[in-house]
Image (cartoon, coloured by chain):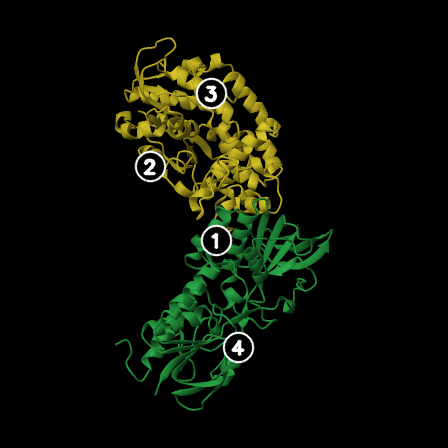
């Protein structure tokens, strides 16, 4: 405990007085044996968290912090301990691979950086790449990894480009010069990698004139809003739903999408950054859509399991969990009777689509809000 | 006739009552069986008082000073009340002093005879208080803290790992003390904090059933002990202390994880509760005032009159009434003083 308390960020674990409020809202505990209180107690009675599998199970979703009377901040504790573990060479292999890919290629998927804007070809609208056309631009669209490379993410990126064009937004992307912001890598213990990426990101951003950054990734958004200013880098940053929500009238959404839709709040947009309305405004603007909420929503939204490195630890964590968090969440979505599970975090489409299949809920369609809006454009 | 308020007992509650009555201008007689005032904190060598860690000697000395500053105060040390007249007040109180038996007339007698620490030898868990030198009680550690030397009594070395075991002799039907002794959570936490300050390399655990830190004690004692001084609170009580390799193996259940727990300790501190002192039992009997099943004086009209007893003109204060912290002692002392002074035949205070 003293070793953890001595870490910057690790100070608050010892403050736990065991009330247990965190355990029922811990998404990991719902599918396993976890929760900050239990971690605290086990550390008190001898668990070496620096070497334990449990170190990697927290998704930093912050639902525990929301309810904690002692403000035990696992969103800081876990990354601090992970950082020390990583420095000592104790990191799950599958996560280490992602760190290496991120270091080498600037993206977590290990894809070719030159292919980062390959998706623009099929966008159906022109997408300006600043490297080639460096004129000042209003909105810098920071695409991030999963919208750049994952096939389902690319579809959302294309849809979002069409929406911005429709709304008359002046936008451009960095293309091959873009690297991931790497917030999840930071929370998974690679603060050094995050800081190295930040140097690159800040340098590239410094080359161009823009007013605002818009990103679909709540993780990158979180870092730009909360972490970058700590290092003296401040930008006006919007999540893409925050850009579109005030412009919804300009989209002229005239085509009906007759469907029951439920919405999954991303942890890093909702709980971490307080944005619950923009995505709902957009969903409800679509004619024909009936929005039904899941029991766990908004501040108490369930975690998809992808945060804090969880995106890359499904195999490692499988030993400890009865099912994936994404599977649990998909079952909750299906219980609402919804036909579509709407998301607005690039991690989620692939996670939830896999989970829909593995839980026998194939009829539940997982769609990014950008794709849903795109369907409704007349 | 010279009527006086008679206070039996010169500890924190008795002194509070005597000072308040004296400051109101009443003639006061304090009867103390020991050769000095100050009560348990002095008799048992407390290092500091809960919750603010004030030096016990200084604080009690300050109270004695305040008492002596009152106009008409008589302090009878090494003295005991040996008889009280029957019937209604005013009472004739017979007091045996080193100079012989004296009599005082009093319309109001205040019983401030206090508590004694539970004898851990009676604990059904067999913690080995009389068997293992390194098993001590709160007041033993308190005395070590006052000496400025926290050591293992077995070998004189500084302990590396220390634990407190809560609720020893309290909340136990088998023992007969069903009540919570109220102060032990705070006192143990206070001592744990002091141990951590004295021995920064030590690990300190507190094993508890419920942590009872009411009101401001939460933020005055509990949270700082945990957050600043790194005291480890573990919910789950120790049920066995076994000797092992020169250490004490404490065994219990980690109730919140539902599994057994076994940790070697260098020093085990039993957080013993409160029982009525022999003086409280004796005075209650002599005065003919009702006691509860535990032997403490029964307050007649709780909760808002905490000091009146079953006999008109006899009041009880502090731990003579049951487990109480120092704030309680000061409060009940003050209330009893007001009631006692109001019964004096002549108006006081000009």
Q: Nearer the viewer, mark 1 or mark 2?
A: 1
Would you name the residue on which mark 4 appears? B279
Task: Give me the C-alpha separation between circle 2 and circle 4.
Answer: 70 Å
Q: Nearer the viewer, mark 1 or mark 3?
A: 1
Q: Nearer the viewer, mark 3 or mark 4?
A: 4
A198 in relation to B255, above or below: above
Chain letter behind tag 1: B
Q: Is residue B293 among the parts visible in the rendering?
A: no
Distance from Cα at disc 3 to Cα at disc 2: 31 Å
Question: Which residue extends farthest bottom?
Answer: B87
Q: How dense is the environment of label 4, judged by Cα within 10 Å: few (below 14), some, or many (20 and up)?
A: many
Q: Mark 3 falls within which chain?
A: A
Which hue belongs to chain A?
Answer: yellow
Which badge, 1 or 4, is on the more N-terminal residue? 1
Mark 1 lies on residue: B222
- Depth check: give the residue in front, B222 or A185: B222
Q: Are marks 1 and 2 in contact (CB under 8 Å)?
A: no
Provide the secondary structure element on which disc 3 rests: helix
Residue A373 lies, in percent from the top left, at 35, 28
Badge 2 crowding class, 10 Å Cα cut-off, few under 14, some 14 to 19, many 20 or more, is: some
Q: Which shade is chain B?
A: green
Cα distance, mark 1 to mark 2?
A: 40 Å
Tell if the residue under mark 1 belongs to the same chain as the one under mark 4. yes
Q: Are marks 3 and 2 on the same chain?
A: yes
- Give the alpha-carbon distance from disc 1 to disc 4, as whole Å: 33 Å
Identify the residue position indicated by label 2 in the image: A277
Camera-near label (1 vs 4) is 4
């Amino acid at each position: 405990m003293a070793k953890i308390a001595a870490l910057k960020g690790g100070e608050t674990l010892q403050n736990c007085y065991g009330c247990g409020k965190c355990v029922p809202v811990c998404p990991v505990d719902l599918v396993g044996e976890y929760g900050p209180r239990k971690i605290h107690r086990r550390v008190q009675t001898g668990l070496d968290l620096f070497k334990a599998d449990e170190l990697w199970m927290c998704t930093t979703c912050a639902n525990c912090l929301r309810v904690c009377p002692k403000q035990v901040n696992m969103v800081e504790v876990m990354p601090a301990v992970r950082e020390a573990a990583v420095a000592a060479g104790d990191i799950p292999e599958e996560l280490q691979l992602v760190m290496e890919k991120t270091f080498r290629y600037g993206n977590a998927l290990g894809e070719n950086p030159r292919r980062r804007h390959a998706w623009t070809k099929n966008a159906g609208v022109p997408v300006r790449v600043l490297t080639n056309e460096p004129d000042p631009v209003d909105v810098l669209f920071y695409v991030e990894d999963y919208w750049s490379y994952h096939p389902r993410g690319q579809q959302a990126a294309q849809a979002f480009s069409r929406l911005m064009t429709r709304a008359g937004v002046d936008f451009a992307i960095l293309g091959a010069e873009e690297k991931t912001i790497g917030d999840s890598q930071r929370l998974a213990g690679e603060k050094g990698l995050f800081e190295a990426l930040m140097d690159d990101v800040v340098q590239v951003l410094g080359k161009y004139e823009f007013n605002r950054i818009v990103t679909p990734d709540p993780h990158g958004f979180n870092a730009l809003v909360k972490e970058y200013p700590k290092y003296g880098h401040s930008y006006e940053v919007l999540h893409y739903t925050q850009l579109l929500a005030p412009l919804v009238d300009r989209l002229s959404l005239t085509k009906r999408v007759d469907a029951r839709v439920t919405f999954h709040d991303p942890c890093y947009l909702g709980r971490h950054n307080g944005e619950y309305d923009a995505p709902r405004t957009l969903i409800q603007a679509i004619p024909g859509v009936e929005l039904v909420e899941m029991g766990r929503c908004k501040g108490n939204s369930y975690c998809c399991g992808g945060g804090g490195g969880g995106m890359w630890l499904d195999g490692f964590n499988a030993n400890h969990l009865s099912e994936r968090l994404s599977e649990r969440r998909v079952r909750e979505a299906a219980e609402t009777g919804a036909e579509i599970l709407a998301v607005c975090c690039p991690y989620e489409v692939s996670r939830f689509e896999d989970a829909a299949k593995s839980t026998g809920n194939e009829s539940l369609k997982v769609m990014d809000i950008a794709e849903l809006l795109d369907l409704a454009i007349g | 006739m010279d009527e006086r308020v008679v206070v039996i007992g010169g500890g924190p509650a008795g002194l509070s009552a005597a000072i308040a009555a004296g400051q109101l201008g009443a003639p006061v007689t304090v009867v103390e069986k020991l050769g000095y005032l100050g009560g348990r904190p002095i008799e048992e060598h407390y290092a500091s008082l809960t919750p603010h860690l004030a030096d016990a000697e200084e604080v009690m000395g300050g109270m004695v000073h305040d008492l002596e500053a009152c106009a008409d105060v008589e302090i009878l040390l090494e003295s005991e009340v040996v008889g009280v007249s029957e019937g209604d007040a005013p009472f004739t109180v017979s007091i045996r002093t080193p100079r012989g038996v004296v009599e005082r007339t009093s319309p109001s007698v205040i019983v401030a005879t206090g508590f004694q620490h539970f004898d851990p030898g009676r604990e059904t868990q067999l913690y080995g208080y009389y068997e293992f030198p390194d098993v001590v009680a709160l007041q033993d550690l308190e005395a070590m803290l006052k000496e400025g030397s926290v050591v293992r009594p077995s070998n004189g070395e500084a302990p590396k790992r220390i634990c407190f075991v809560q609720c020893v002799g309290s909340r136990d039907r088998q023992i007969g003390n069903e009540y919570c002794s109220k102060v032990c959570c705070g006192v143990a936490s206070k001592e744990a904090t002091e141990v951590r300050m004295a021995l920064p390399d030590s690990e300190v655990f507190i094993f508890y059933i419920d942590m009872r830190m009411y009101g401001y004690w939460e933020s005055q004692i509990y949270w700082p002990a945990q957050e600043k001084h790194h005291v480890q609170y573990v919910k789950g009580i120790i049920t066995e202390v076994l000797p092992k390799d020169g250490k004490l193996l404490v065994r219990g259940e980690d109730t919140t994880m539902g599994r057994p727990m076994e940790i070697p300790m260098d020093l085990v501190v039993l957080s013993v509760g409160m029982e009525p002192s022999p003086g409280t039992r004796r005075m209650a009997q002599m005065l003919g005032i009702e006691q509860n099943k535990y032997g403490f004086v029964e307050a007649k009209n709780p909760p808002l009159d905490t000091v009146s007893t079953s006999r008109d003109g006899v009041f009880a204060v502090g731990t003579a009434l049951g487990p109480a912290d120092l704030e309680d002692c000061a409060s009940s002392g003050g209330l009893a003083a007001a009631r006692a002074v109001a019964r004096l035949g002549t108006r006081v205070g000009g």
